[in-house]
């Protein structure tokens, strides 16, 4: 699909998308209510449950707020989604300062609603070090540049009525599918997909915030990859999907308000669960982040 396709009416302006990004930054900015305790708000969107990327990003902010050593940034996180979050209530984040070593810090975060844990995250932080061996997997070749691809609203315009009000809302993350949109690929079998992404505006040059926004964005398309071998999309009738766990490793510097290629692969789908892996590259081919996610994928009818 060409980027010259006519833009649909009533789509958000660049200013509205920047405001949506600013709102996301505000959403991730937790309130400290006690030592090692933070409170996070939820969006006013009409959701059945809290978006997994939101609670993961907020939990990483909570963990980062307890790491006092300058220049010590997250290098890995492992998270489990335990219960659906209630989007109408704030979320409490309790941080356990497990260890502070000479070059590493480890934190455990539990997100709580209604007195019960809904999410658990462990994160490790590492002082920046240089030197030593350096190797990475390569970015796939032949990727259409993001500037030549339609944005979400243009790409999904044929499905605007089906998507409903959510289609017209401003989006804090600009997603551009390289291999065609999920609905247009129905009935075709694929083992992976490529998505360009970036913050839909300008972000502060803060490594903690950059990592948390990318954590938020990394949950947006990866689980859908587990359906591609079957030619299915997330809106297939009777299909139930939900994130179960999420892991990330941060390898090299990146800016989320610059284009990143999210290279995704279906690893295994079976037993009502799907596992997918992702590699996030900077536009010049540096491997910035690795991601693995498992989720529920079952038919209820």
Image (cartoon, helix red, strand yellow):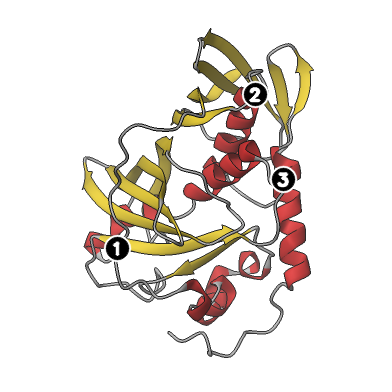
Disc with the residue nearer the chain's start (2 vs 1): 2
The quadrant in which residue 18 appears is bottom right
Among numbered discs 3 and 2, the one appearing first in the sequence: 3
Residue at 49% across, 72% down: 146
Asked whether, in this view, residue 198 is left or right of residue 19, the answer is left
* Residue that mark 2 sits on: 70
Q: How far, Cα to Cα, is label 3 from label 1? A: 31 Å
- The x and y percentages for residue 112 are 61, 22
Can residue 81 be seen here? The reply is no
Give the foreground label among 3 and 1. Answer: 1
Relative to residue 202, is residue 272 drawn left or right? left
User: Which percent across, then down, holds residue 186?
Assistant: 31, 72
Q: Are marks 2 and 1 in contact (CB under 8 Å)?
A: no
Residue at x 23%, y 47% (from the top left corner)? 269
Whole-angstrom CA distance, mark 2 to mark 1, is 35 Å
Q: Is residue 221 above or below residue 269?
A: below
Q: Nearer the viewer, residue 254 or 21?
A: 254
The mark lying in front, picked from 3 and 2, is 2
For residue 140, the mark is: 1
Q: Nearer the viewer, residue 79 or 278?
A: 278
Q: Which mark is residue 25?
A: 3
Image coords of residue 148 (percent x, y): 49, 80
Mark closer to the chain start, 3 or 1: 3
């Amino acid at each position: 699909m060409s980027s010259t396709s006519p833009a649909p009416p009533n789509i958000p302006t660049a200013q509205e998308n920047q405001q949506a990004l600013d709102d996301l930054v505000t959403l991730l900015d937790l309130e400290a209510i006690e030592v090692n305790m933070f409170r996070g708000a939820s969006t006013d969107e009409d959701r059945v449950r809290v978006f997994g990327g939101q609670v993961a990003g907020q939990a990483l902010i909570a963990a980062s707020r307890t790491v006092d050593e300058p220049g010590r940034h997250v290098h890995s996180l492992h998270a489990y989604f335990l219960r659906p979050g209630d989007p109408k209530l704030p979320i409490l984040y309790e941080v356990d300062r497990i260890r502070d070593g000479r070059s590493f810090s480890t934190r455990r975060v539990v997100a709580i609603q209604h007195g019960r844990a809904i999410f658990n995250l462990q994160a490790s932080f590492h002082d920046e070090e240089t030197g030593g061996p350096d190797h990475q997997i390569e970015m796939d070749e032949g990727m259409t540049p993001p500037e030549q691809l339609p944005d979400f609203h243009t790409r999904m315009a044929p499905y605007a009525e089906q998507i409903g009000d959510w289609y017209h809302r401003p989006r804090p993350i600009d997603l551009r599918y390289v291999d065609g949109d999920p609905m247009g690929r129905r009935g075709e079998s694929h083992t992976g997909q490529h998505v360009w992404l970036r913050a839909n505006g300008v972000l502060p040059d803060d490594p903690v915030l950059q990592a948390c926004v990318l954590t938020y964005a990394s949950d947006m398309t990866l689980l859908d990859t587990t359906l591609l071998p079957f030619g299915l999309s997330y809106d297939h009738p009777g299909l139930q999907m939900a994130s179960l766990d999420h892991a990330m490793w941060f390898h090299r510097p990146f800016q989320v308000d610059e284009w990143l290629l999210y290279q995704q692969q279906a690893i295994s789908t079976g037993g009502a669960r799907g596992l997918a892996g992702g590699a996030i590259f900077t536009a010049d081919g540096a491997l910035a982040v690795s991601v693995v996610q498992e989720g529920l994928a079952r038919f209820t009818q």
